Amino acid sequence: MILPVLTEPNPLLHQQSRHLQPEELKLPKIQQLIQDMAETMYTKDGVGIAAPQVGESIQLCVINKEYTASPNEDMVLVNPSWEKASAFKATDIEGCLSVPKIYGDVKRFKKIKVNALDKNGQPLQFVADGTFARIVQHEIDHLQGTLFYEKAKNLREITVE
């Protein structure tokens, strides 16, 4: 099911999300939420989506398989955290499903080490770089209540027809 995406201004988008317990991942409603988030992300042409964007204040995000190291399956991150794996940063343009038509230049680490649980509650550790690292940082920001424009420079409206 395609879920409505919350847009600015909405206080839920600025709240720290709660951690999920591994046993919660066994609940049918959470597994359905993961499927619905993925369907919503693809319908809205997103590269990632975080639970707060669909009204659920939990530490859960889905990343489009085209940008992950495993092109056969979307990546589900539960309770994710990251640390820099390199001191190098890069600036690139970002947008967000929750801030329609607004884009800005955001500086982010080029390479990060990620710790999370997968959709089954199993520990997940990996290194992400390039666009994949940027998407992970953007989605984890959502889980912390931060939107990209709070870090962006040169904000501008771009209308795509």
Image (cartoon, rainbow, N blue to C red):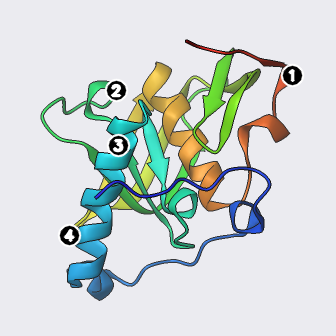
Which dot, 4 or 3, sits closer to the camera? 4
Could you tell me which residue is drawn at 34 percent across and 43 percent down? 126
Please state which of residues 38 and 126 is positioned toward the viewer in this rendering.
38
Q: Residue visible at 64% across and 45% down?
A: 98
Whichever of callouts 3 and 2 sits on the residue coming sooner in the sequence is 2
Determine the image quadrant of residue 115. Answer: bottom left
What is the residue that sits farthest to the left in this orientation?
72
Residue plotted at (84% across, 40% down): 150
- In the rendered structure, the answer to whether residue 126 lies left or right of residue 46 reads left
Asked if the residue at tag 2 contacts the one at tag 3, i.e. Cβ–Cβ closer than 8 Å, the answer is no
- Name the quarter where the N terminus is drawn: bottom left
Q: Nearer the viewer, residue 25 or 126?
A: 25
* Mark closest to the chain's N terminus, 1 or 2: 2
Q: Earlier in the sequence, mark 3 or mark 1?
A: 3
Which residue is denoted by mark 3 in the rendering? 126
Q: CA distance from mark 4 to mark 1?
A: 38 Å
Q: State which quadrant residue 63 falls in.
A: top left
Foreground label between 3 and 1? 1
Q: Amino acid at mark 3?
A: Phe
